[in-house]
Each structure stands twice: as C-alpha cells, then as structure tokens.
Image (cartoon, helix red, strand yellow):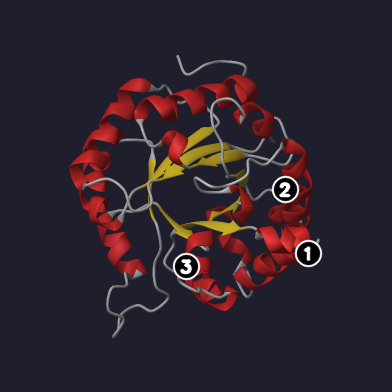
Amino acid sequence: MARRFLFGTNFKMNQTPAESAAFLEALAGAVVIPDGAQLFVIPPFTSLPAVTDLAGATNSPVWIGAQNMHWADAGAYTGEISAAMLQALGVDLVLLGHAERRGLFHESDRDINRKVLTAFERGLRVLLCVGETADERAFDVGGETVARQLKIGLHDIDPARLPLLQIAYEPVWSIGAAGVPARPDDVEPMARLIRDVVGERFGEAGRDVPVLYGGSVDAANAAGFVALPDIDGLFVGRAAWTVDGFRSVLDASLRERFGRSIG
C-alpha cells in the first residue's frame, strides 16, 4: 500500500495570532488536497488558540502542530507547555527534536525521548526531527548521529503508537537562511538509513513510518526530493511562510507525487 504524502511548515518565532489564522484561512481557499495527502502547519504557541479555533469551526483537514512541549504533566517549569495544555487547544501534532531545540536550547536525545513517550501516552501525533551537523558530516559520522538520535528518541515506545509517528530528516548544515542546499543524492542514503533503523527496531510497521525531508526546500528543488523512494513528504521552512510560497512548493511536490497540480 502506498504511504501517505505529508507536507507542511513550521513558522518558528514568526506571526501573530491574527497572521497565523489569516494564513490558514487563505490556505483553505488556495489549495485542493488530493486523496493520499496530508497538510500541516506549526505556528508559534501564542497563535495556537486562534488557529485551532478556526480549524475546528471550518472543519479544516489541515493538522495544526505545536513547536515543542515538556515531558511532565505539570510542575515548576516556567515557560514550558504540557501535552495536556496542547490537547486542550485541540492540537493534532507536536514537533520534537528540532535542530534549533537541540542546538540552541541544549535538548539531549534523552530529553527528546521523554517528550516522545509523553506525547504518545497522551495520544498526540509526533513529528520527530533528526539530522547531523556540518562537523558530523565532515567527519563522516552523520549516519551514526542520525541512528543514535532515532534509537534513543524512540526508546521504550509502544509499537502500537507507531501510527502517530512521523520522522523528518533535517540536516543541520542545510536548514536556515545560511544553510547549504542538500541534493537528492545527499538525502537518499539518509532516508534509507532512517527507514532501516526504525524497521530493525519495529519490523514492517517501522518501515511504514512516514519519512519527510526538510532543509532549504523550495519550489525549484522540491520535486527532486519527492521523487526519492524513501521520502514521504516535505517539511518546508521559510519558502512556505506565505500562502503563495506554500502553494508554489506544494504544487511542485504534488505534480511529482500525484501527476497533478493543486487545482
């Protein structure tokens, strides 16, 4: 059975609640989602109430994600957000292990594992990010890095929760405004490695976990990544922060994957 195609973006620390809601509203009128595809947007925490309210009122098929969460249900964790808080807002998905959380905020693989376990216990979908730095790539340990992140990040999870899991390969050396665009030849072996590592841990069910690519993706290079056999979707950055940009990259992706445009 063909795996579902996923496509979405993370707004990072951008947009007010009104701007995020306007984005979702405009997106609804700009795209027709084909069968077999799933869209998602991940706004900042302050935008979540406005966006989830709008998604609920319009019965939007777009998943709404949160950019992070703490593993504890409650406690003295000033500035943190719990899974229960996200569920109360009607969030569909939580992004965990993003390179900026690992690098700028020093989240360890064990921290991320705790968050994954909590999200799954609460029934939240998880988009788990993995990827190597430029130094790790230069020293030829990128594969070992990604395998370690996966093995620790997914340690002790209940295999029954695998349908809630999505994995995004985001090489740290390729993301952000200063990133070096990766080529499909760079991504193909890492996507295959991810599928092999998860498959070895969970069997055939693990091999069916969606693997997305993210890192300097735009309308010009999207099709090359979508064409890879082990890539099930794209996690797009700044190129998709406007509705026109989102639509443009999505259109290139759908033409490659489904042989049709957005419509």
Measured from the top left, where is residue 248 in percent x and y?
47, 23
Name the amino acid, label 1: Val
The structure residue drawn at horizontal position 33% and vertical position 28%, both measured from the top left corner, is 27
Q: Which residue is mark 2?
A: 191
- The Cα–Cα distance between marks 1 and 2, rounded to whole angstroms, is 15 Å
The disc, 1 or 2, on the residue closer to the chain's N-terminal end is 1
Q: Can you say whether 204 is above or below 2 in the image?
A: below
Measured from the top left, where is residue 41 in percent x and y?
39, 43
Q: Quadrant of the N terminus?
A: top right
Name the amino acid, label 3: Leu
Crowd rating for badge 2 (residues with CA inside 10 Å; few <14, some 14–19, many 20+): many
The disc, 1 or 3, on the residue closer to the chain's N-terminal end is 3
Q: Secondary structure at mark 2?
A: helix
Q: Which residue is mark 1?
A: 141
Q: Nearer the viewer, mark 1 or mark 2?
A: 1
- The Cα–Cα distance between marks 3 and 2, rounded to whole angstroms, is 25 Å
Answer left or right for 35 relative to 224: left
